[in-house]
Structure formats: C-alpha cells, structure tokens
Amino acid sequence: MTVPVRSNSYRTGPDEEGHFGQFGGRYVPETLMPLILEVERAYAAAGRDPVFHAELKHYLTHYVGRPSPLYPADRLTAHFGGAHIYMKRDELNHTGAHKINNCLGQVLLARRMGKTRIIAETGAGQHGVATATVCALFGLPCVIYMGELDMERQRPNVFRMRLLGAEVRPVSSGSRTLKDAMNEALRDWVAHVDDTFYVIGSVAGPHPFPMMVRDFQSIIGEEVREQMVKAEGRLPDVLVACIGGGSNAMGLFYPFLDEPDVTLVGVEAAGHGIESGEHAASLAGGRPGVLHGSSTYLLQDEDGQVIEAHSISAGLDYPGIGPEHAWLHDAGRVRYVSATDQEALDAFTLCAKLEGILPALEPAHALAHVAKLAPTLSRDTLLVVNLCGRGDKDIFSVAERLGVEL
Amino acid sequence: MSDAPPRGRIAARFAALAQEGRGGLVTFLTAGDPDPQTSAALLAGLAQAGADLIELGMPFSDPIADGPAIQRASVRALRAGMSLRRTLDMVAAFRQQDQQTPIVLMGYFNPIVRYGIADFTAAAGRAGVDGLIIVDLPPEEDAELRRHAAAAGIDVIRLATPTSDDRRLPLILEGAGGFLYYVAVAGITGTRSATDAAVADAVGRLRNHTSLPLAVGFGIRTPEQAAAVARVADAPVVGTALVERLAAGLDDQEQAGPQTAESVLDLVSQLSSAVRSARA
C-alpha cells in the first residue's frame, strides 16, 4: 500500500488524484469526469479567494449561528464518574445538525460555477433539510433524493424539506435507504451535467468531495481547539464522534490529526450487533471495495454485491465510509469502535434526562461509547463528544422502540 | 484456453464488417437475467439471430449508470443466484460452441475488486472474454485493470461521451483497446435518445481523433435508430430495448416462459436486418 503521507503528518492527503493511500479516487462514469474535474478546479480557486472565505464566514456566523458552544456536561460527567465530558453543540446550528456547514460551502461554490440547480441525497433528512434550507436562502431549485424507508422513519424532515421548497423524490430501489438515494442522485447528475451541482452530504463520493466536505466541516474541530484552550488552558485528550459516512467525525478530528496526544475515536453503528450481520459498521464488518465514486471499506458479500446496512439511525445506515476514515483506520491514527441500536437508545434517554438535551440517534451512538469509555478514564481527562444533531426528528422512531403511541 | 487468440476476436470481427462494407450489431443483455438457464439459451442464440458482438452485463447491486430496466435485470439475475463466477462459466460454455463472436463484459468495478483484479482477468481470459467495459472506472483509475487485462489478452474498452471535449479525448484514446464506445447521451441507459444528426456529428469528430472502430450506444431502441447509427458508425449497441422485451415476456413472478427467449431473439433479428441493409 502506498501512503500519501510525507514527513510525519496525517494532514497531507489526498494526493493529486484524490487518493488517501489505496482509498478514495474518482470512480465515476466518464460522463461525469469533466464536471468532477471542473469542481476540483473551482474549489481550488475558491480556496485562494478571500471573497469566498468572507462570504462563507458571514453566513456561518449570522445565519448558522457559529461558533457552536463547547458545553461542559457536568451531570453526565458526574453520572459516569470518570472523564470530564464536554459536548460540542453542533445540534444548535440552524437546521439542527452539522450538515449545514458543508451545504453552505458547496452551494456557494455551485453559485460561483454558475450552476442553477441543486440535488442532494439524504438519509436521516438532516442533509436534505440543510441543503433545502441553503437553496431557499439563495433561491435555487432543489431536488432531494430519499429512500422510501427513510421517508417513513423521518417524516418530520420530509415535511420540513417540502416547506422549504425542495422536491423530495422517493427512491424505491434496493434497500430504499441512503445508499439507494445516493445511486439515484448520481443518476440524476449524469443526466444533468450542464446545469446541476450535486451537494454530497458526507466525506464520501469521488474526489474532491471527501476532501472538500472535510474542509468545510473542519470548522467543528477548529472551534473545539480554540474553545478548549480557552476553557481549560490545553488541548482535549479524547475526541469521540459517530460515523456513517463520517463527515462530523472528520470535521472534528482533522485539526487534531497531528496532535499525537489527542486520542480520536470514531463510533460506527453496530445495529443489532456486529455478530448478527445486521449493522452499518463498514470498518468492523466490511472489506475494501468501490462504491459511489471512491475506494473504501464496504459491507459486501463474497461476490462483491453491496449488502444492505442496518441501523436504527437513518443517518448511519450506509454500507460504506469516507475514504479518509478507511485510510486513518489502516494507518492506526483513529480508533474505530461501534455501538448497537439498544446502546444508542439508552444513551438517548440518559442524555435527555440528565442534560435536558435530545440528541439525534446518530450522536447517541457516540454518547453510547462515551458511556463505556468515560468511567475508565481519570477525572482530569478532557473528553469531547460531538453532538452533531438534535433528536427532534427521531422522536417517532424512539417512541416506536419504547412502545409508545404518539 | 480457446483456439483463437483472445486478442484477435474483436479486431477480426470489425475487420470482417469493414470488408463486408456493413455496420455490426452489438447486443446487450444482463448475464443470468431472468435466470441462468434462460440467459444461457439467449446467449447461445444471439449470434444466429444476427448479433455481431455480444455485450454481457455483470449484474451489480448498485448500477449507478443504468436506468430502471437494466437495474431490474440486475436484481432478477442476482435473485436467481447469478454471480461473477457464474458469468464467467456462462461465457466459457458459450465458447465451446462459438469461437468467433466477440464477448465483452460490461459492469461495475466492485465485483472485480472483490474477485481480485489479476485473478479475474486471468479467469476471464481463460473463459474466452474479449473485452471489458467498466462504467465506473475512468482512465484516471483503470491502469491496474488494463495491465492485468493486457496480460490475459483482454481489451479494456474506453467510453467517450458528449462531455468528452478535445482536452479530454486524448486521455481517453491513449490506452483505449478493442473499439471506442461512444455514449450518445449524457445520462443513464434507457432514457433519452440522441438525434441522428448529433450522433453523426460526434462520430465525425471522434473519427478525427482515432482509427479505432466506433460503437454507439445509449438510447438506440428501434431497428430504424440502429440503422441510422450503422450508416455513420461501425456498430450500434442496443441494450435496454432488449432487456425490456425480455421483461415483457416474464410472468407475474418474473419467471421466464417458453416464448421469452424467442421474443428477444426476434427483436435481435429485426435489428440485425435493419443494420445489415442500412448502407445498401
């Protein structure tokens, strides 16, 4: 395996062809290649343009509400009796999740490129809502692809997207979840290369998307760094984030990759348990392969057919993972663990009762791991968990699991 | 190992077509659709019905460049137990009977990665596969596959599209093997059709850049459309129309009946006679 790392840095990837070691790349139909290359050039140009940065900062500050707080969760800390737990409150962003950090960046880029139509895929609906929101803000027509199963699980977000003026197109193929929504969005893009920009919601897809989404989400980790130094006079010791495609985790981890004393932990969705085969843990239960434009770890059978993922959380219900995570996994820089549906539900209710915060089921997986990890750590350990989304959208699924009729 | 050197079949077929002064017909069906037996029977009958080159789809769970008809073909084939290994077995069985008709496998990269790239190309070469079209493997990513395919005597066929501008074409053509596949519409299979004039324009432009034979696919559904392509290019590719014909012959349980294969082969015959007389 070739490793793109020069010197001792984990922050130099991807290489010019979009590879993180053996992962990443651009595995798309030829029709899309010129457009993908154009996105790459436009993104590089935007990165050099102070006007782009100023515009992004303006909306992140005054529209999204950044910086999000770094909150010392004292009741949870006392409950677990170990590490000092901080929550990065990205669920307080406008639209209720970290997704909008990336949507703003990509839609501003699409505008610079003269694209007049936006498409996106969504699983939990958070990325769809964020994309629909930014499109409403800029008056752009917006089509959101969403698996039929996810539409059932996330009814409030479907309605929200429609209120925002987006067209939500149900996807009935395959497992009718996030993977299939992404297939359909790619098919749309191939057929509308002239006017359309595909706002990919995670650190997935062909180069330059994994890099670009990571960069737009890195504001999470940059803020944590500054806020923790201000609060405690030093860097945090442990960072914990959930992983579906892995954008909130990548955004939290990236600014800390070259801090050897900061432990990074990514939490995949173990569904009914890794051993049950019904899970969404691509690293724990998958093998390297190629899907949706990049080479990465995938849940797949012996014949290379992609297996349907399972998670109570629609946002983690994806059989792949961002290629940079695949590389960080193999390089050993980030520790990847998993939490089951039940563990996430327990963490969800605990967080609601102890902190007065309904976390989304996605970060409830990160909290579930904190429940295991925090008690084993000393009281002077600074642990940050990324609360990347709020749980209002999940109350129907949670009620169903708790046997409550709403 | 078959008698004819594998590298030769695609080139030999296009040379023969040029000699005859006619266009060729390329047919696409998904391997194992709707079940391995019917699919094998179809494969055995295609050349007789007038297919000059055979494209065989390798079923995949997530075919991002395909429209609903070919997506459903993949689902049917996979449900019936098709796999990449069985696809190669099917080609090997076909080669026992037919040493001449080129077979090109078309599909997505992941099953090949899972099989092992070198193992796959070696097995495909032994089975009698002549070419590979991997739709999610652009020139930027296909070096490893091309290296192993070359060692097994298999051409990796490159795709050009309406979005392939003069800056990109040289990259596509450098290392293109067998023939060039022109995707006539920017989109997925089985949706829109390009106008005859647009195809003629594109073919003219491509001829300025390459001497490879040119096949044109996507949106070619009728004998008339196939004939129009055969007048300007070396071969039209018809896929979705055949897959839809096959699907129309299935019962409520998506099982093949006695007429299923025959009705597909009838359409192949009609397409073939239109293509054969196109330049007359």
Image (tube, helix red, strand yellow):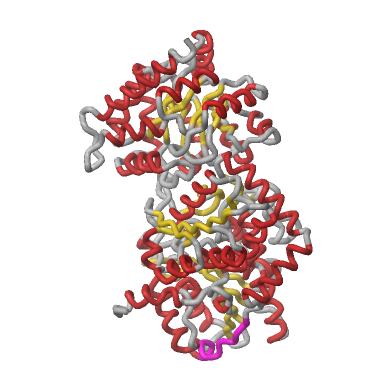
Q: Position of residue A393 (x, y in %)?
A: 44, 74
Q: How many marks?
A: 0
Q: Quadrant of the N terminus of chain B?
A: top left
| Residue B257 position (above or below residue B12) | below
Magenta-colored span: A69-78
Where is residue B88, by image quadrant?
top left
The residue at 48%/45% (across/down) is B64
Where is residue B190, by image quadrant?
top left
**Left or right of A157 in this view: A61:** right
**Left or right of A24 in this view: B77:** left
Q: Position of residue B195 (x, y in %)?
A: 52, 30
Q: Say which of A340 and A103 sits in front.
A: A103
Q: Position of residue A184 (x, y in %)?
A: 46, 50
| Residue B250 position (above or below residue A363) | above
Q: Position of residue B7 (x, y in %)?
A: 53, 20
| Residue A284 visible in the displayed image | no
| Residue A10 position (above or below residue B20) | below
The residue at 40%/34% (across/down) is B240
Q: Say which of B33 and B4 sits in front.
A: B33
| Residue A252 visible in the displayed image | yes
Q: Is residue A77 magenta?
A: yes
Q: Is residue B1 magenta?
A: no
The residue at 56%/87% (across/down) is A73
Q: Say which of A46 and B159 sits in front.
A: A46
| Residue A386 position (above or below residue B137) | below
Where is residue B204, by image quadrant?
top right
